[in-house]
Amino acid sequence: MASPYDAMWQELGLDLAAHEQLLQVLGGGYQQVFLGQPNRPAGMDYFNFVMSEVHGLRVKELVEAQAAGKKVIGSFCVFVPEEVVRATGATLVGLCTGADFAAEEVDKLLPRNTCALIKSAFGFKLGKICPFIEAADMIVGENTCDGKKKAYETMGKMVPNLYVMDLPQVKSDQGRALLKAEFARFLKAVEDLTGVTIDAAKLREGMRIVNDKRKALARLNALRAADPAPISGLDALLINQVAFYDDPIRFTGSVNALCDELEARVADGQGAMEKGAPRVLLSGCPMAVPNWKLPWIIEQAGAVIVGEESCVGERGARNLVDDSGQSVDELLEALVDRYFQVDCAIFTPNPQRLAHVEQMAAAYKAQGVIHYCLQFCQPYQMEALPVEQALKAQGLPALRLETDYSQEDAGQLQTRVEAFLEMLEK
Ligand code: BJ8
């Protein structure tokens, strides 16, 4: 079916037939997973609209901004500081994707035992179905897990504009110094790309915009502590996913408007799910659009997800940047302070993540934790057992699950989730 955006997509170099196929699958999946949920807040209408236009209107906005001289930067990791990008008036968009595509082509370039998240990024590029990756003036990779850092060597030959950020793996003084040096190098690269010199005022403004977004997400998360939860975990995940694409100021306004509605719901004792529904915390690998399989299975089984300890969730969005610094260097220090707290499993040792899982479980009154891991993701697989053991030692049940982007294991996952939930209800 012809779309009003066909000409734009063609200009970006998309394969229109393949892209149409993706949109059909995405639209069908969205309808099934999200639109049939009971008691959705009215404020979710905005996010439905954003999702329906994620490759349309949002991309058009970015292309129009580019025509007016603004730049678009794509990233695969929450370590890329959006504040620096916003300081120049450019836009940062997330490029991680949650669906398999062009699998045969991907298998020619990557080992079979590469995680689905990395394979998906390659599949979307090789299949020419992602307008964001095609529109990006610069793509930022990062040296995090082994899979990603080696994959960027190959990706560098597939895109004209890959910038790789080195990241520490240890939270030592040397690690912090590396992060600061890399943020300073990135700031310079963004200045070069945009032609904008970043002064303290501009950087503070970037920090203000991103802090406001994080505050809105924290407000949303806090409301989920109520029983009944005023919003489903699926909808909260969707909002966290949209955070990576949407205009940040508009997004913040929409999340705050939704939170006003949710506050009234909490005051009235109304919820998206029934009072007393089993409460589950999800912890582990990031879930990018349209990776909704596991949350859907959990909530279809009658539980409510009350938090995501994930980079598409609280690990990625928590902690604000102190924007009181007067010089670019002072502000960079504050930026490093904030990002150095991100407790990705690539860090060794990483006790902060375990502490955060425990803290979230308590804050959101979770009765159990489901640890979600993508197949072949060694960092999170390695941490899964210590997380499970620590939670169980505190009397909190935990379930470790490993999956990918296919639907083949949906039945098996459902059986395991249902058994886990039954145990919580006893
Ligand atoms: S800060 S979690 S966004 S690196 S799933 S590609 S870890 S093998 S995504 Fe991540 Fe940044 Fe860390 Fe967050 Fe590797 Fe695991 Fe694949 Fe992963």
Image: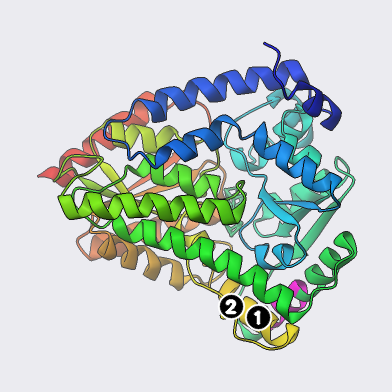
| Most common secondary structure along the magenta stretch | helix
What percent of the width, then of the height, locates residue 158? 86, 40
58 or 285: nearer the viewer: 58
Type of amino acid at the residue the image marks with label 2: Lys
Residue 234 covered by magenta stretch:
no
Does the residue at mark 2 contact the one at mark 1 (Cβ under 8 Å)? yes
Q: Tell me: 141 left or right of 274.
A: right
Q: Quadrant of the N terminus?
A: top right
Residue with the mark numbered 2: 171
- In the drawing, what numbered circle is on residue 176? 1
Which of labels 2 and 1 is toward the front? 1
Q: Quadrant of the C terminus?
A: top left
What percent of the width, then of the height, locates residue 365? 23, 59
The 10 Å Cα crowd at callout 2, few under 14, some 14 to 19, many 20 or more, is some
Instruction: Specify the segment rendered in magenta.
Output: 174-183
| SS of the residue under disc 2 | loop
